[in-house]
Image: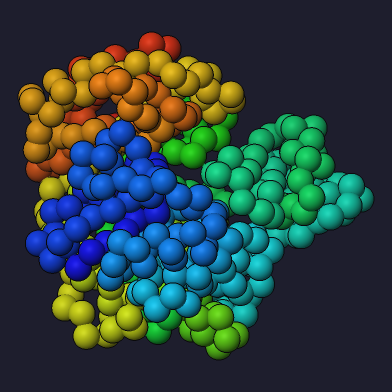
Amino acid sequence: MKVLVIGGGAREHALCRSLSLDPDVTALYCAPGNAGIAEVAELHPVDALDGDAVARLATELGAGLVVVGPEAPLVAGVADAVRAAGIPCFGPSGEAARLEGSKAFAKDVMAGAGVPTARSYVCTTPAEIDEALDAFGAPYVVKDDGLAAGKGVVVTEDVDVARAHALSCDRVVIEEFLDGPEVSLFAITDGTTVVPLQPAQDFKRALDGDEGPNTGGMGAYSPLPWADPKLVDEVLDTVLQPTVDELRRRGTPFSGLLYAGLAITSRGVRVIEFNARFGDPETQVVLARLKTPLAGVLLASANGTLDVLPPLNWRDDAAVTVVIASHNYPDTPRTGDPIDGLADVAAKDAPDAYVLHAGTRAEGGTVLSAGGRVLSVTATGKDLTAARERAYTALGRIRLDGSQHRTDIALKASQG
C-alpha cells in the first residue's frame, strides 16, 4: 500500500515513523512534511487546506490511503475531497470535524448523546460574557469557539484576563472549572465501531509545575500508572461510543480519530473537549507503544471494516516525550536557528530514544528551527522512570540557541 500523510508537525512525523516500520507500506509520502519526516518519507509540496490539490496529489502518487494529520484541513473538508476522488481517507468529513471546529457544536452533540461534560454557556455579546463569568466564578474557563491551534483556552483566577480573552473571540464558550487530573484518550472509529487506544497525559503549560501560559503541549507520557484500570472501558461506554452513535444518528457519521480530553473529577469522568485528529504530543507516546502495524488499522477505519480487525497489541514499555520549543514560545517564537546534536542522538540513543521533528526545515545540509514547537524527544523504557531518563539524556545532546523545555514531564507519575 502507498500512503500519503498530510501535515508537517511532530504528530505527522510520529505517524510517518510508525507507517515506515509497517511491512505493508510499500511507499510513504508526506505533504508538506519537515526536515525529520524527509528521512522516512518522500516529501511533496501542497497547500494542506486545498482539498482538490490534496486529492490531485494523492491520485498522481497512486496512494491507497491518505492520512490527514492536522485539524484545520479536516475542518476545511479535505477528507471529503479525497474520498470524492475515490481514495480511502483516514479522517472525518468537514461536517463531522465540527466536533473540534466548534466547541458549541461539540457541547450540543454531547447533550444529545448524554455524555458527561462541564456545564457551559455559549456567548456572543459582552453582556452574555459577564453573566456567564459571574455565574461560574473563579477559576474561569474561557474557550474560543473555533480552532486556535491549542491556544484558544484561558484558565485563570483573574476575571479581567478571562473577560479580555472572551471579548477577543467572535463566539466563546464559558464553562465551569473541572477539578482533577486530565487524561487524553484516542479512539479509532469507522463511524460505527470504536477502537480505543491507550490513554496518555500531556502537559499544556509552558513551565515546570504547570506554570506559565497554555501551549499546544510541552510533553506527554503513557501509560498512566495512577489511573483506574477500568478507565478505558468506562470512557468507551459513556463517552466515545455514545458520541459516535449520536453523530451517525444526525446523519454526520464520524470516521477517523476521535480524541477525548477528559478530567477525572471527584464526580466522575467529564469531557473537557473533543478533537477530530491525533493529538500532539500524545501521539508520540501512544504510537511508541503500539505493536500492531498502523496502516491496516487506519485503512480499516477508512473502509468501514474495524469490526473485523483483530484486537490491538501493545508493548508493556512506557513512553515519554519532551518538547523542545523555540525562544519566546508560545508568544511570537524565534525561528531560523540551527539545531545541533541530532546525529548524536541517532548514534548513541537509538532505538530506545529518537527525535521527532515538529517545526524544522532543512537548508544546505543544516536543520533549522521553523516553528514554536521544534522537536519532540521521545523514548521508551521498562517503566516511566527509565523512559524519562532516556528522553532527557537524549535531549541533553541537542543544542538550539534560546530553546526551552520542561524538566518535569512524567516526573510525578514516575514517582508513584
Establish if 379 lies above or below 86: above
Residue sitting at the far front:
60
Residue 406 visible, this angle: no
Residue 352 visible, this angle: yes
Where residue 360 appears, as percent x and y from the top left, is 37, 30
Where residue 74 appears, as percent x and y from the top left, is 51, 61
Q: Residue at coordinates 69% horizontally, 49% vertically from top-left?
A: 144
- Number of numbered discs: 0
Where residue 238 appears, as percent x and y from the top left, is 45, 75
- Is residue 183 left or right of 171 when viewed as pictured? left
Q: Residue at coordinates 29% horizontally, 67% vertically from top-left?
A: 62
Q: How is the image coloured?
A: rainbow
Residue sitting at the far right:
127
Q: Nearer the viewer, residue 55 or 150?
A: 55
Residue 25 falls in image quadrant? bottom left
- For the N terminus, which image quadrant? bottom left
Where residue 10 appears, as percent x and y from the top left, is 35, 41
Residue 391 falls in image quadrant? top left
Q: Nearer the viewer, residue 223 or 143?
A: 143
Q: Residue at coordinates 62% horizontally, 80% vertically from top-left?
A: 112
Q: Residue at coordinates 48% horizontally, 29% vertically from top-left?
A: 372
- For the C terminus, which image quadrant? top left
